Image (cartoon, rainbow, N blue to C red):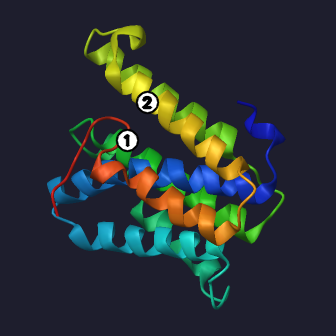
Amino acid sequence: MDLNSLNHWQQLSFSAAICERSLPNFQLFCELEERPEQYQQSRKILNKVWEYLRGQLSSMKNIEKQLDVLNELVPDPTQHDHYGAYPAMDSMIALQSCIQGILDDSIDDAQAMQTMTHERLLEVFELQEQSKEDSELWARQLNFEQEVYDLVCEKISHADAIKKLIPLSRDNGVSQLGICIDD
């Protein structure tokens, strides 16, 4: 899978899928920190990304402001006493990357987001003294990425691709780390 060969829309769609899949990590962090409004803000911003990718965003006016909002949402892991701040930070960095990609179509961060996701998974495996080869999460992540890649490469309309991509990315609310929050 060569992410660098994808066009901007395909890369942004791949990135949004990675971001969507990581959002339960941020949701759990917000619950632990008793900041549910921060999760709601992130959800609204990611929904705007999906609207943009479907070609349904009515105005670009507030997109730049979303970067300022996101800057406030990114947790600083050194200020928290639990590991969850790290995957939560990754989730918000991924969302920042998506917004930046909307604002500047020369930015294609899909490869960087994939790498960040893999590094966090490998770190979790190390903490659990588990190898990636023995991990169902690793296999699920690679399968997910391949499905997303195949979907964004299909010759279908952007709206139809996103319609399929969102439920795939939400994966019944389970993150790439296996975190699931019941709403």
Q: Which residue is mark 1?
A: 87
Q: Residue at x 64, y 42 (%)?
A: 149
Q: Earlier in the sequence, mark 1 or mark 2?
A: 1
* Residue 99 vertical position relative to residue 65 in the rendered view, above or below: above
Spatial distance from mark 1 to mark 2, Cα to Cα? 7 Å
Q: Picture quarter containing residue 126?
A: top left
| Helix, strand or loop status at disc 2 | helix
Q: Which residue is mark 2?
A: 120
Measured as percent of width and height from the top left, residue 163 is found at 53, 66
Q: Is residue 136 left or right of residue 143?
A: left
Nearer to the camera, 22 or 26: 22
Whether label 1 touches label 2, CB < 8 Å: yes
Nearer to the camera, 4 or 73: 4
Measured as percent of width and height from the top left, residue 99 is found at 62, 66
| Helix, strand or loop status at disc 1 | helix
* Residue 139 vertical position relative to residue 152 in the rendered view, above or below: above
Q: Picture quarter containing residue 86?
A: top left
Disc 2 residue type (three-letter): Arg
Number of numbered markers: 2
Measured as percent of width and height from the top left, residue 107 is found at 77, 55
Q: Residue at x 61, y 61 (%)?
A: 161
Q: Is residue 22 left or right of residue 37?
A: right
Measured as percent of width and height from the top left, residue 114 is found at 58, 36
Q: Residue at x 28, y 9 (%)?
A: 129
- Please rate how many residues cluster around mark 1, counting C-alpha atoms within 10 Å: few if below 14, some from 14 to 19, many from 20: many
Q: Is residue 10 left or right of residue 165?
A: right
Q: Quadrant of the C terminus?
A: bottom left
Q: Residue at x 21, y 39 (%)?
A: 81
